[in-house]
Image (cartoon, helix red, strand yellow):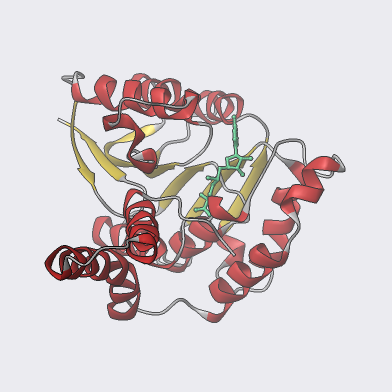
Amino acid sequence: MARPVTPLGILAKTLESIVQKIDTTDTVLKDELCYAYQIASGLDPYLEDCTTPDSEPLRQLVTKTQQEEWGQNWQKQVTEVPLEQEMLSGHVEGQTLKMFVRMTQATRILEIGMFTGYSALAMAEALPEHGQVVACEVDPYVAQFAQHCFDNSPHGHKIKVKVAPALLTMRQLSDMGESFDFVFIDADKGGYIDYFNFLLETNLLAPNGIICVDNTLLQGEPYLSEKSANGSAIAQFNRHVANDPRVEQVLLPLRDGLTIIRRV
Ligand SMILES: C[S@@+](CC[C@H](N)C(=O)[O-])C[C@H]1O[C@@H](n2cnc3c(N)ncnc32)[C@H](O)[C@@H]1O
């Protein structure tokens, strides 16, 4: 069972715990807490319900990702980095990315951080036949896992996987004169500022290109006083983008935060 990894999911879980524990004769307080819990816990299922369902290959990819023993894989050194099922972005975010690709009519997509390939495949589904997703992933095992899932989809052939640290792949792509009209950043949080700067300072982001960045709310940490290393990295990234006159951006409270960025 996946643990909550979004500000809303954590809020709902916390309210649930309070509602279960509260021992009071104050029925007004109890009713208010139950109301707050219902509002918080009902939102995600409602969003899921009102959003176009995933394709069968995406559903199978999710199930396969949930069934994999990621903790054991890391202990047994099957994977080179620690991975967990919660990394997968999921239905509403996947459909959002797919919608953005259609809206921007992007044909060249760069993904930085692929994991089992959920977001790469969701975006590929929105591409025309000649479109391409170049997906950067540092871990060879999960890259192969994703490739098996892509092979089960009629859109999988549009995805080209590059197994290496993303910045290395980005340098190679830039040297080859490649550029992308849609970029999804969803890898190591400490690398976000470098990825962002590199995209803006090279030809890699096409002149009217869009960058989408995941986890920019990182479980609420950027606006809370206690931060993990990833929380601090995201807080710094968000400040960096907000202070950068080269871009305009909006941080959407979708799942764990999704920032949309364009050059001005
Ligand atoms: C949050 S997951 C990506 C989830 C995926 N985009 C999705 O929506 O399902 C982050 C992935 O980035 C990969 N990663 C971490 N650091 C990286 C790096 N420096 N270069 C490339 N990939 C990296 C991790 O191995 C992991 O698979």
In the rendered view of the protein, which quadrant contains the C terminus?
top left
Q: Residue furthest right?
A: 76
Which residue does the image show at 29% across and 72% down from the upper left? 42
The correct choice, above or below, for 76 with respect to 178 in the image is below
Q: Position of residue 56 (x, y in %)?
A: 55, 81
Question: Relative to residue 164, is residue 78 drawn left or right?
Answer: right
Point out residue 255 in the picture as x, y percentages from the top left corner: 35, 54
Q: Is residue 4 above or below residue 251?
A: below
Furthest-front residue in this view: 25
Which residue corresponds to the image point at 25% horizontal and 50% vertical from the top-left?
253
Residue 31 location, quadrant: bottom left
Q: Position of residue 129 (x, y in %)?
A: 48, 67
Write down the quadrant of residue 74 in the picture.
Answer: top right
Residue 207 in the figure: left or right of residue 31: right
Report x, y in % for residue 219: 38, 42
The residue lying toward the viewer, choosing from 112 and 203, is 112
Quadrant occupied by the N terminus: bottom right
Residue 156 seen by the camera: yes
**Image position of 251 with respect to 104: above or below:** above
